[in-house]
Image (tube, helix red, strand yellow):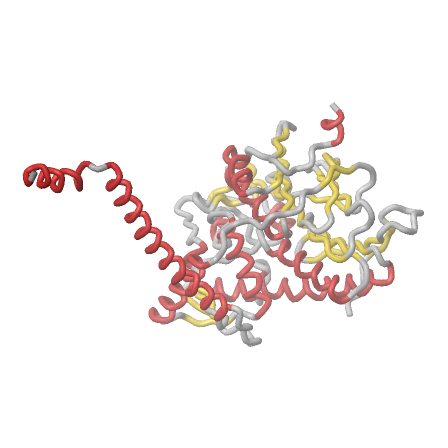
Amino acid sequence: MITDRKNRLEEKPVNSPALSKARMAVSALMASGTLATAWLATSLAIASHDASESVAAPDTSVSVGQSSHESSEASHSSAKKRTSSSSTGFAPAKQAQPASGTTHTKTKGS
Amino acid sequence: MSTPGTFRSSDAGVMAEPVEAHFDAIGTTNRIIATDQTALATAVGLAKDYLSDLDRAVSRFRDDSEVSRLAATAANGTTWCWGSPLFLDHLDAALRAARLSDGLVDFTVGSAMVAAGYDTDLEAVRARPGFTLRLEGVRVPGWESVGRTSDGRITTPRGTVLDFGSTAKARAADVIARRLALTLPGGFLVNLGGDIAPSGTAPAGGWRIGVEAADGSVLQVVSVTNQGVATSSTQLRRWQTDAGTVHHIIDPRTGRPAPLTWAQVTCIAADTLEANTASTAALVLGEDAPDWLIRKGVAARLDRPDGSVTFTPGWPRPEAERAA
């Protein structure tokens, strides 16, 4: 009995299909939880960044000058931030219809 | 206010038809079409004023523009400037186009464009005899190398020449169309050198847009109500060099003119900037263009130099083809 019980205790955690499935489910849950947390953090960062970018630019005349290394780095990191936080998809458009006859205007290469 | 250009009815004798005015600006012919005749003169004035300001901000061909001044100082090293609101708006549009196109539409191709010979108005470029192509060693800095802070400070690396040629007309068409609809009665069609933006109330049956080939013939007519329409071509802005004919669509991956796979590509999208971004990217991509457009969900008509045509899903098939 004791041996049987011991065998059961030793074998079931390794071989039970039910337990394997349970382990996979737990792993999946943990992974999705991590992803959800990461997604939430990213979304908050994007919302914060978009809000800061919606501030109207000052109406100043243009001044041009050589950049210091520091300011250059700051601007570049800003550009990278924008890149990572912006939508990259074309917006859905209503479908155009076939037509004939006179035209209101023409599209041509430019 | 600016004086309106030439007026004519789009369909002479039919009073219900929209009316049109056209004028030259930013190196091309521009057309404003209005459903309400009383709004046309004001609409043209608004468009002319906007395009005049735009030329001062982003033209590569005038020394006093913001783009030219930035390029002049960038020749000596990494540089920066405060952009005007109009410059920043067009920079943001160009950044959006770069992201949408996976970097295929890149506004830092200016130095490559200059090396290819397109460094002044096209008529002057064409009139210049024996231009020597200088494409060896040309490098496109890449749109991600340009910094833009939320308070309007723009930074560019050494040697960068910004070129908004792939986005400025389209963005301008979108902005002008929106302003017209907000301030004037009726519907409008703003056509800046072939980049077309509708706004307000479209006429019954929609706006009929002809897709024009390089020889001036109309390939097809489509009807839109609120979509942007744009065509990019390898056939029109061309000039001679010592190495043969070149055109103005630069592949930012190589710094050289894009392949001549397509004579022109026309796209329909949610706005004109997106339509022109897609059509320009398609020319750069060559044979890969149809698959890319399908993946991006953009309706397009792609015409090869031999006259054969490819359509992506969502593009209205020509009526003759539908009947067959």
The residue furthest front is: A1
Q: Nearer the viewer, residue A34 or B195?
A: A34
Q: Is residue B319 left or right of residue B309?
A: right
Q: Residue at x 81, y 50 (%)?
A: B203
Choose between B265 and B117: the one closer to the eye: B265
Residue B194, given in percent of the width and then of the height, sits at: 69, 48
At 43% from the left and 51% from the top, the residue drawn is B140
Drawn side of residue A70 relative to residue A64, left or right: left
Which residue is painted at 43% across and 44% down in the image? B253
Which residue is at the front of the view, B33 or A81?
Answer: A81
Which residue extends farthest left?
A3
Instruction: Give the quarter of the image for residue B23.
Output: bottom right
**Outermost right residue:** B13
Query: Where residue B289 sits in the image (x, y, percent)?
Result: 53, 37
Judge whether B22 appears above or below B221 on screen.
below
Residue at horizontal 73 percent and vertical 56 percent from the top: B199
Q: Is residue B34 above or below residue B288?
A: below
B286 in relation to B1, above or below: above
The answer to whether one can see residue B57 in this image is yes
Where on the picture, by quarter, is residue B305? top right
Residue B296 screen position, x and y as percent: 53, 43
Q: Quadrant of the N terminus of chain A?
A: top left
Instruction: Residue B320: give x, y in percent of width and height.
Output: 75, 28
